[in-house]
């Protein structure tokens, strides 16, 4: 044992001697090779620090990037081995955070990221990703990963390795997701500094992901969709809006790419999880970009349409129009305005469908609680999925419904507002009819809930779905009178809930939500 320790110390001193500043590249390379061997067996902090402080990092950079033709034939080692040895040394340095957070280590990140490649037949890319995972765990250095160029490389690696889904692919995804967390935490502490550091981050990432997401040939849309929904959720509304303000053209481009991809997903049969992820992404971007994410204003054209298409007769146009939405996207290449219209119409229609389905599921749950049905879901997975839909998807659909109501109100204010809106009068009427069906389902559920065993004022006051449903329904009733008569029965239970909340100090904050609902219903003379 003592002789082994002595040999290690001797090798260490020899390495340090060879790595001294001023020695030749040949000597440094020999020292680098010996150093790799020593660090594989001795990785204590003191040894690592001595090596780190003796390292010629300019030389190490050159060795990490050395090209195949740069190594003499009689060197006894090829360029691939030299690159691998260099990455092994960086891997050893990354073991101790005291070394990893130092400037000299951080300055090697551009070189390592530049080596990342999905076609790398060595283990170098896998090792580099492990190093970047470690970097992402330490606030002292992790902000370096928000560099737009680095993230573009990481996103490219993710896109190119979907078919593998190996450990390196998962590491790349972990780095990508952690970067959003890094931005989230940094933005909370110092918004202006983080916005400045990451000014190109979001445009680069969203452009990189949205382009393949928009193409018909992309087979990994569901995976991209989930990554986008999970990552953007970490960014605050203020952060995203600031990026949108500073990069309007780029934001418009990637948002339209996303809409194109979402149209394709929502127009075809998908797994339930993919459909839910679609609503998550739509809802998240609605929260961060505002109502114009779904209903942008379209300026009235100042001149007639291009004669290249206007010269066709209406019968020719009808005949050349494909029968399906996906076909139209593929053969006619939808214009930007057409994409916006298709997206908005599809989102509203499918949101209304989702609301009706969710209301039916919630009503079935009430029946089960009352003993009329022993089982609502056949498997545990179905039950878990239903919980996710109730807790995550339903609130998002309500937000979409409220924005849709706002759109109807806006375009009804004047002819000019209608002209600047996405839809003509016929399109607006279709949206209104879809909303009427959704709100009729919400009303039916509320009436079923009031007739169930969970209808006490105490139970309703703690039922978030009841509170949210009453609020969104009251907003709709202010704009549409088709359900006024049926909604009258909702008033007495609501008033009982308000009286109960007034007697409980812990529930008085709910009055800010409930009393405006009561005022709306009284204004409509439903009581």
Image: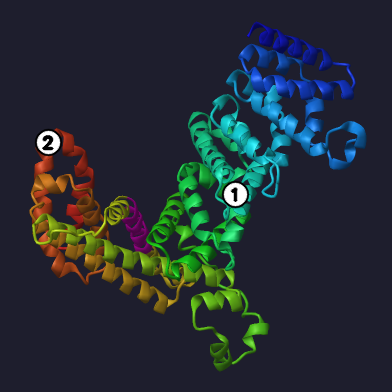
Q: Picture coordinates of residue 345 (x, y %)?
A: 43, 70
Of residue 366 and residue 20, the one placed in the foreground of this image is 20
The answer to which of 279 and 475 lies nearer the viewer is: 279
Q: Nearer the viewer, residue 317 or 273?
A: 273
Q: Please give the name of the residue rendered at 75% of the width and 10% of the height, measured from the top-left corner.
A: 10
- Marks 1 and 2: which is nearer the front? 1
> What secondary structure do most residues of the magenta stretch adopt?
helix
- Badge 2 marks a residue whose secondary structure is loop
Per the model, the C-alpha gap separating discs 1 and 2 is 52 Å
Residue at 59% across, 20% down? 96
Residue tagged by mark 1? 158
Vertical placement of residue 66 versus 18, above or below: below
Q: Which mark is residue 504?
A: 2
Residue 158 as seen in the image, left or right of residue 229: right
Task: Specify whether 312 is left or right of 459.
Answer: right
Where is the N terminus found, in terms of image quarters?
A: top right
Where disc 1 sits, the SS reads: helix
Q: Quadrant of residue 113?
A: top right
Cβ–Cβ under 8 Å for marks 1 and 2: no
- Name the colour scheme: rainbow
| Location of residue 139 by image quarter | top right
Quadrant of residue 435 in the image? bottom left
Residue 479 seen in the figure: no
What residue is drawn where x is 46% and y is 63%?
295
- Residue 403 on the magenta span: yes
What range is drawn magenta here?
A: 392-406
Q: Is residue 42 left or right of residue 235?
A: right
The disc, 1 or 2, on the residue closer to the chain's N-terminal end is 1
Residue 461 appears at what percent x and percent y?
Answer: 15, 45
The location of residue 468, given as percent across then percent down, is 25, 52
């Amino acid at each position: 044992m003592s002789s082994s320790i002595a040999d290690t110390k001797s090798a260490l001193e020899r390495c340090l001697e060879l790595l001294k500043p001023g020695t030749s590249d040949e000597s440094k390379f020999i020292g680098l090779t010996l150093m790799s061997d020593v660090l594989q067996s001795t990785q204590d902090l003191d040894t690592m620090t001595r090596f780190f402080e003796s390292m010629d990092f300019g030389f190490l950079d050159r060795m990490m990037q050395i090209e195949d033709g740069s190594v003499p034939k009689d060197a006894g080692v090829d360029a691939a081995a030299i690159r691998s040895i260099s990455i092994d040394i960086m891997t050893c340095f990354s073991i101790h955070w005291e070394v990893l957070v130092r400037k000299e280590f951080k300055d090697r990140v551009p070189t390592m990221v530049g080596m990342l490649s999905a076609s790398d037949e060595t283990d170098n890319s896998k090792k580099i990703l492990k190093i970047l995972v470690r970097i992402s765990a330490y606030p002292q250095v992790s902000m370096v990963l928000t560099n737009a160029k680095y993230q573009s490389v990481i996103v490219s690696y993710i896109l190119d390795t979907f078919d593998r889904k190996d450990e390196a692919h998962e590491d790349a995804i972990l780095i990508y997701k952690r970067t959003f967390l890094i931005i989230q935490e940094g933005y909370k502490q110092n918004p202006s500094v983080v916005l400045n550091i990451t000014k190109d981050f979001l445009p680069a990432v969203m452009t990189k992901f949205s382009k393949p997401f928009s193409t018909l040939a992309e087979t990994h849309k569901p995976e991209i969709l989930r990554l986008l929904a999970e990552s953007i959720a970490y960014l605050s509304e203020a952060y995203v809006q600031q990026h949108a303000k500073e990069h309007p053209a780029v934001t418009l481009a990637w948002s339209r790419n996303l809409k194109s991809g979402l149209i394709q997903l929502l127009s075809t049969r998908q797994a339930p999880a993919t459909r839910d992820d679609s609503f998550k992404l739509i809802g998240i971007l609605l929260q961060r970009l505002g109502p114009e994410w779904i209903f942008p204003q379209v300026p009235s054209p100042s001149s007639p349409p291009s004669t290249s298409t206007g010269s066709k007769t209406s019968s020719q146009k009808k005949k050349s129009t494909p029968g399906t939405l996906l076909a139209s996207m593929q053969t006619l290449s939808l214009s930007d305005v057409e994409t916006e219209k298709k997206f908005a119409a599809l989102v509203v229609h499918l949101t209304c469908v989702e609301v009706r389905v969710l209301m039916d599921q919630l009503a079935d749950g009430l029946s089960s609680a009352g003993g009329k049905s022993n089982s609502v879901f056949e498997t545990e997975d179905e039950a878990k999925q239903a919980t996710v839909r109730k807790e995550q998807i339903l609130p998002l659909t309500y937000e979409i419904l409220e924005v849709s109501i706002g759109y109807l109100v806006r375009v009804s204010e004047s002819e000019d507002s209608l002209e600047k809106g996405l839809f003509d009068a016929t399109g607006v009427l279709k949206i209104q009819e879809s909303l009427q069906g959704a709100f009729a389902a919400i009303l039916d559920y509320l009436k079923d809930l009031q007739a169930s065993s969970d209808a006490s004022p105490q139970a309703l006051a703690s039922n978030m779905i009841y509170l949210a449903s009453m609020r969104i329904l009251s907003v709709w009733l202010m704009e549409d009178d088709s359900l006024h008569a049926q909604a009258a029965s909702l008033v007495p239970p609501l008033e009982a809930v308000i009286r109960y909340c007034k007697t409980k100090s812990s529930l008085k904050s709910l009055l800010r939500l409930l009393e405006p609902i009561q005022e709306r219903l009284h204004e409509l003379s439903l009581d």
